[in-house]
Image (cartoon, helix red, strand yellow):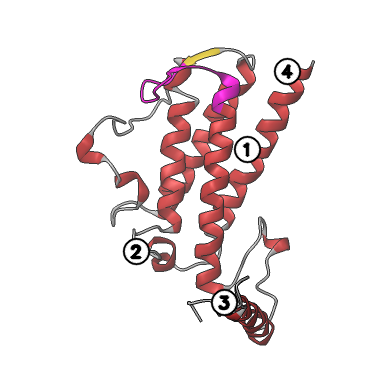
Amino acid sequence: MIDEFGKEYLHSDLREIRETMLWKLDGLPEYDVRRPLTLTGTNLLGLVKHLSIWESRYFGEVFDRPFPEPLPRWDDAAERGTDMWATGHETREEIIDRYRRVWKHSDATISALAIDSPGHVPWWPRPDVKLFNILVHVLTETSRHAGHADILREQLDGSTGTAAKYANSQRDAAFWEARRTKIERAAKAAVAKPDHDGSINAHN
């Protein structure tokens, strides 16, 4: 009983965070979902592409239930990193649709297997796993990238949150400027605070 509860709990959270990832693309022009927004090139559509490829592997070949579409080899050094951005020939629709097909395939694997069903991850140091390990890993990885996407989307138009109804974009610019000013003031006050020996922090 507890095993089924645990599996459904993790699976439910995974379903929700997947939808969050796609919401982060909603309403943005093509350039903004693709363009690099960090020094390392992190971008919104690339995060979705990355998650679609790796979720397909984790709930596919790890349990001998391969996703029925061609994927780049995980051990191909020449392809390393190309899952993190969309080429000019890949459309937003192609990447999103594949992610949804991956969900369907993954959901079938999760439903078919017990939480202690064995799997094998050849790229892990300890490759023998259970479905439980993979559910936790994919949920953690997707949540991590949803956090990245949240920050990227905030940079673009101020929207934050896990769904449109929770977005903060309805706040006006004056509200957020006041918030930033307050936080900046607190940061400077902390730096200027005397150390325990009475000296002023050197970073002031």
Q: Which labelled disc corresponds to residue 3?
A: 4
Instruction: Write down the region rendered in magenta.
Output: 120-134
Task: Report, in whole angstroms, how far the alpha carbon at label 4 lies from the one at label 1.
Answer: 17 Å
Please say whether residue 121 is one of the residues in the magenta stretch. yes
In the picture of the structure, the residue carrying the numbered disc 3 is 191
Residue 203 x, y percent position in the rendering: 48, 77
Lower position in the chain sequence, tag 1 or tag 3: 1
Task: Report, in whole angstroms, how far the alpha carbon at label 3 lies from the one at label 2.
Answer: 27 Å
Answer above or below: position of 186 versus 52: below
Residue in the picture at 48% in, 77% down: 202
Amino acid at the residue labelled 4: Asp
How many marks the image carries: the answer is: 4
Q: Which labelled disc corresponds to residue 133?
A: none
Q: Which picture quadrant has residue 6?
A: top right
Observer-nearest of 190 and 22: 190
Please say whether residue 29 is one of the residues in the magenta stretch. no
